Image: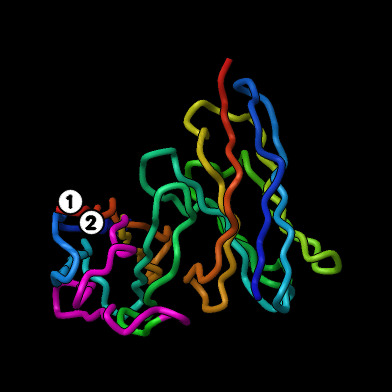
Amino acid sequence: EIVLTQSPGTLSLSPGDRATLSCRASPSITTSFLAWYQQKPGQAPRLLFYGASSRATGIPDRFSASESATDFTLTISRLEPEDFAVYYCQQYDDLPRTFGQGTKLEIK
Amino acid sequence: QVQLVESGGGLVKPGGSLRLSCEASGFRFSADYMSWIRQVPGKGLEWVSYIGGSSLSKYYADSVKGRFTISRDNAKNLLFLQMDDLRAEDTAVYYCAREASFGVADSWGLGTLVSVSS
């Protein structure tokens, strides 16, 4: 089973700040089969990115995603009040499909 | 636009059964894989099951294999999850999700809460 570890667990920032969220897979994912989701309290998750860096429909361009040899990264360039939420990564490189434990982005 | 509406959740005793339904609209239902994903309140996400458009391809997480059965009715745009021999650890919000791209849940329902308790 591929275990996704997200860091940090909680990120405390202010509106206008830049947020950088990380997701590391073990064992490594050799494809780009990784997605990112945003979940607000009381709501279902919302797809942000798939294929590691392809933005889903309707996602603002202040959100970006990338991958390196070892990590996947979600970046929010300038935080808006509505961006404070929990973010999950999810791999679909292999079964079982697994999610990271989430990063909570909270207002500082 | 894509709409997914789950129903059928509720309180059930250990060992009991429930059947979840998901009514889909706004897309060509028969063309897409569909999934059930669950979330223990306040906790993380678990991909429970998926089914291909023609029902030939199915997957179950080890935690539910042999107890849950996924099915679909393409004529009525309905997805189902039959849950038998329910356990306390099955308590969660169950989401219906569309996979417009295989492996990616691009649209989600609001979820239905399943509580297993004596």
Foreground of the two, B85 or A86? A86
Tell me: residue B112, above or below residue B15: below
Quadrant containing the N terminus of chain A in the rendered view = bottom left
- Taking the spot 63% from the left edge, 29% from the top edge, the residue there is B85
- According to the picture, the residue beneath numbered tag 2 turns out to be A105
- Residue A7 within the magenta-colored segment of the rendering: no
Pointer 2 and pointer 1: residues touching (CB < 8 Å)? Answer: yes
Tell me: residue A85, above or below residue A67: above
Subunit under mark 2: A
Foreground of the two, B45 or A56? A56
Q: Position of residue A55 (x, y in %)?
A: 38, 82
Tell me: residue A17, above or below residue A11: below
Neighbourhood count class around disc 1 (C-alpha, 10 Å): few under 14, some 14–19, many 20 upward? some
Q: Which residue type carries mark 2?
A: Leu
Q: Secondary structure at mark 2?
A: strand
Subunit under mark 1: A
Foreground of the two, B110 or A69? B110
Neighbourhood count class around disc 2 (C-alpha, 10 Å): few under 14, some 14–19, many 20 upward? many
Q: Secondary structure at mark 1?
A: strand
Q: Which residue type carries mark 1?
A: Thr
- Taking the spot 44% from the left edge, 50% from the top edge, the residue there is B46
Q: Position of residue A107 (x, y in %)?
A: 20, 54
Quarter where residue A100 is shown: bottom left
The boundaries of the magenta stretch are: A56-85
Badge number at residue A10: 1
Q: Point out the tag, 2 or 1, that comes first from the N-terminus.
A: 1
Quarter where residue B107 is shown: bottom right
Foreground of the two, A108 or B29? A108
- Taking the spot 14% from the left edge, 53% from the top edge, the residue there is A108
